[in-house]
Amino acid sequence: MTVWVDPDVEEIVAGLEGVTAEVVATAHRGAAKLKANIANRTGAMAGSVSAERVGSKDAFFGMSDEGALGYNYGHHNVWSDEDVPGSHVIEKTIREM
């Protein structure tokens, strides 16, 4: 059996009524969860969490703080010469969604 799939299927689905609104709402829910997950560790980092709409059909959430990658994945403290484990709050947030 042969099935034809329109090569623009992603654009078609993204343009369906309600889909974009749900994508944006999901990004905002993710930002709220991420903020809650890091608020108890560092308020400054939580303050950098946001959700943003991209173009007319997409959205994302994340942290804009300069230390976000080191905070999430861990880093090496050169002053104390020790490894600092990451919080992995981004992965935790995604698992909770």
Image (tube, rainbow, N blue to C red):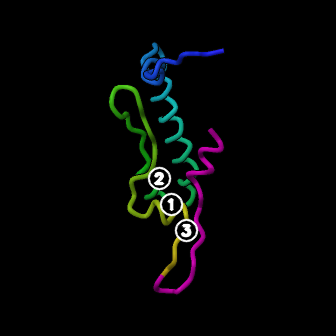
Between marks 1 and 3, how big is the CA–CA gap?
15 Å
Residue identified by numbered label 2: 46
Please name whichever residue, 43 or 7, is drawn nearer the observer in this view of the structure.
Answer: 7
Residue extending farthest to the left is 55
Three-letter amino acid code at the position of disc 2: Ala
Question: Which region shows up in magenta?
Answer: 78-97
Q: Earlier in the sequence, mark 3 or mark 2?
A: 2
Quadrant where the C terminus lies?
top right
Q: Earlier in the sequence, mark 1 or mark 3?
A: 1
The picture places residue 72, in percent across and down from the top left corner, at 54, 60
Residue identified by numbered label 1: 42
| Residue 83 is inside the magenta segment | yes
Please name the residue shown 53% across and 53% down the image. Answer: 39
Please name the residue shown 42% across and 39% down the image. Answer: 51
Residue identified by numbered label 3: 74
Q: Secondary structure at mark 3?
A: strand
The picture places residue 6, in percent across and down from the top left corner, at 47, 18
| Residue 7 is inside the magenta segment | no
Q: Secondary structure at mark 2?
A: helix
